[in-house]
Amino acid sequence: MHKKVFIIIISYNGEKWLQKNLESLQQSNYPIQVLVVDNHSTDNSVAIIESFTNIQLIKSDANLGFGKANNLGIKEALKQEADYVFLLNQDTWVFPDTIGSLVLVAESNKKYGILSPLHFSNDATVLDENFNTYWNRKTNEISENIDEVPFVNAAAWLIPKHVVEQIGYFEWMFQHYGEDRNYVNRVVFHDYKVVIVKASKICHDRTIVRNFKKDMLQSKFQILNAILNVNHSLFKSYWNGFISVFGLPKYFFKYYSLLQSLELFFSLLGYFIGLKIKVFSILKTRSSYK
């Protein structure tokens, strides 16, 4: 019996990729339904999506970012009785057996909380650089086809309905960066596994470019992630966040000038102090994950 799988794509000025992305999904061997949440694109994205008559489209009046837009899509999918949601980046494409391979493994073990395919670059031959880093950190080779990892980015996540119902949705405190790591921490806290299915693959067409403002924002959310990580005590979580205040500028010094590294340090220190002051709000958020 086929399970009801909703593909959820967040689009934002993605006309460069959407045609190939959506066409690849049309070739899936496994029956799927596709739901796109458009984050108020200003290019031709909406017209491309609407040219596919069998795709559901939710138009947002503002750019909600990754997590909040996905929350809209996930809620709508569950409302339509989805058994699984597959979160897929707009700059990717899939293969005919991508979805079916993931569902087959998910059905074999209800403790698989997040299932990811292999992520290849746009040549379909070389692994995506960031993905390869996450895969190399695997903690357990469950089988010839399945590896357990502490984290994998949310470019292509299959999540079972029962996991969403227990874990909840993406945390609203994150703005485009860090939501996936926070979600993984919560999944692991509830004793689910994050796994990579080697029989399944996608291609991720992206170029990673350093940007100081982006790295600063990601660094702040890395500190927030450390503090919200319910796998550690509150004291240890704050300590890990404090260590990152020093460690992140040290890491980025190889990319930026001394002046920028100092700017990053003082910005992160101020951000950390702000989170320290909001300890009761942090406690409330952490408690909601349990």
Image: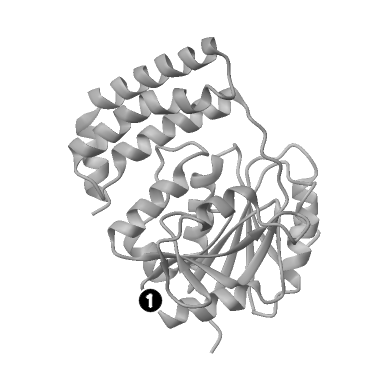
Number of numbered discs present?
Answer: 1
Q: Position of residue 197 (x, y in %)?
A: 54, 70
Q: Looking at the image, which residue is at 63% across and 49% down? A: 129
**Residue 216: % across, % down:** 50, 25
Quarter of the image with the C terminus in it: bottom left
Q: Can residue 165 be seen by looking at this rendering?
A: yes
In-front residue for pair 236/140:
140
SS type, badge 1: loop
75 lies above or below 45: below
Residue that carries the numbered disc 1 in the rendered image: 110
Q: Residue at x 71, y 54 (%)?
A: 121
* As drawn, 185 above or below 220: below
Q: Identify which residue is drawn at 62% across, 27% down.
A: 211
State whether residue 4 appears in this view: no
Query: Does residue 94 sit above or below 42 in this rendering?
Result: below
Q: Quadrant of residue 112?
A: bottom left
Q: Amino acid at mark 1?
A: Lys
Relative horizontal placement of residue 227, taking residue 64 as reference (left or right)? left
Is 245 positioned to the left or the right of 18 in the image? left
Q: How is the image coloured?
A: one colour
Name the spot of residue 116 as percent of width and height, x first: 54, 64
